[in-house]
Image (tube, grey):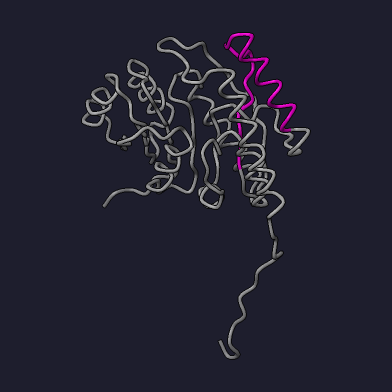
Amino acid sequence: MPVQPDISVLVPVMNEAGNIRPLIDEISAVLAGRAHEIIYINDGSDDAGSAELAAALEEVPALRVLEHERRCGQSAALRSGLQIATAPLIAVLDGDGQNVPDDLLKLEAALLEAAPARGMAGGVRVGRKDGANRRWASILARWVRRSVLQDSHPDSGCGIKILHRDIFLSLPYFNHMHRFMPTLVAREGGIVLAVPVSHRARSMGQSKYGILDRLLAGMADLLGVIWLLRRTARPGKVVELTRRGH
């Protein structure tokens, strides 16, 4: 009988050939000795990534692989992975190798120490290894989110995070929702923790996002999130009544 994993790691990828197997091996080493599953979601790649994942699937028992027929973006990939994940804790990290799998343990410890509160521990990149333009774009996006959404997380765009599965499942789904996860978790009444994490330079491939494209899409998404926040209804504590004598 299969052992129930205590953590599921979701890794969305699109054209990340060469980065796939090294990252799988790193995650496996970090979680060695405990029940876990690693779920790669291949979002319509047209490079050698599919073959790399197929080969790894035969050699890594904890690995599961989903293939999107059509490219739909990172949020859709995370949603596909979440729908088959079975562990009570869901970890997420980018597939480009810039997030450091060792930091999963720090995020997990921070979230578990906050028990019984439930929510998300999100990474805050220290010594970020991205170009100046990308860092300035992140600073601008962070200022906008803080000003408009009261998002106090210092690095909402960091790709590595851990959430309680039930909180993650309760988040509204829309394209690019992964960029607003601290705000969405708080909307559901969850805690949002900021944990310093490492960051590495990309060793292979290139980023899939342009600075201008991301900023323009982000403004449209921001309006949608504002609408969601204004339409939130909170019933307070929900209690189910029981019959007398039971």
Image point 44% across, 39% down: which residue?
A: 76
With 39 as the anchor, is 216 left or right in this view? right
Q: Is residue 62 visible?
A: no
Q: In the image, residue 208 lies at what x, y percent?
A: 46, 20
- Asked whether, in this view, residue 122 is left or right of residue 35, the answer is right
Q: Is residue 60 above or below residue 233?
A: above
Q: Residue at position x 33%, y 18% from top?
A: 17
Question: Is residue 121 located in the magenta-colored stretch of the structure?
Answer: yes
- Could you tell me which residue is drawn at 29 percent across and 49 percent down? 2
Q: Would you identify the image quadrant in which residue 177 lies?
A: top right
Q: Position of residue 39 (x, y in %)?
A: 37, 36
The answer to whether one can see residue 23 in this image is yes
* Range covered by the magenta-colored residues: 120-145
Residue found at the very far right of the displayed protein: 147
Does 47 sit above or below residue 180?
A: above
**Which quarter of the image is occupied by the C terminus?**
bottom right
- Residues 201 and 230: in front is 230
